[in-house]
Image: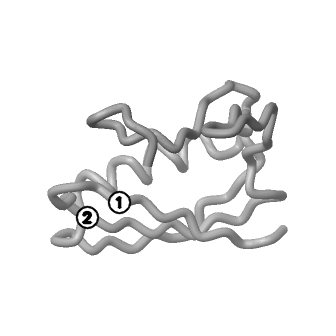
Amino acid sequence: MPLFMDVHNIEGGVAEADVAGAHQADLATQGAYGVNYLRYWVDEEAGKIFCLVDAPDAGARIIAPFPHWVTMADPTGRPYCLTMRDPVTGKLR
């Protein structure tokens, strides 16, 4: 299977212990999604988390594109929305 790097940005930083706990949760559920979480790296001060994942594909798929947002489905089929709006002001970027 291909390898993917999942990158998370946590504003205000992140504790390695918290990431380790989240990684354990990922390991406990990875079989249900057909993925294998191989490794992770943390930059606590910058709030950056990098997760190396062995997976059949990137997982998400486009359901419906619109001018300022896209409706997506996660690997389990749950829908979510990506938008061009600022999360604080609600204005288009």
Residue 31, quarter of the rendered image: top right
Q: Quadrant of the N terminus?
A: bottom right
Disc 2 target residue: 47
* Label located before the other in sequence (2 or 1): 1
Q: Is residue 65 left or right of residue 78?
A: right
Residue nearest the observer in this picture, 13 or 86? 86
Residue at the image point whose x is 71% and y is 65% from the top? 54
Circle 1 packing at 10 Å, graded few (<14), some (14-19), many (20+), is few
Query: Residue 75, image x and y in percent?
Result: 73, 39
Amino acid under label 2?
A: Gly
Q: Is residue 87 left or right of residue 1?
A: left
Disc 1 target residue: 9
Residue at the image point whose x is 83% and y is 58% from the top? 56
Residue at the image point whose x is 71% and y is 53% from the top? 35
Task: Give the answer, above or below, for where 45 lies relative to 72.
Answer: below
Task: Give the answer, above or below, for where 91 lies relative to 40.
Answer: above
Residue at the image point whose x is 76% and y is 28% from the top? 77
Residue nearest the observer in this picture, 62 or 2? 62
Are discs 2 and 1 less than 8 Å apart at CB?
yes
Residue 62, quarter of the rendered image: top right
Residue nearest the observer in this picture, 84 or 59? 84
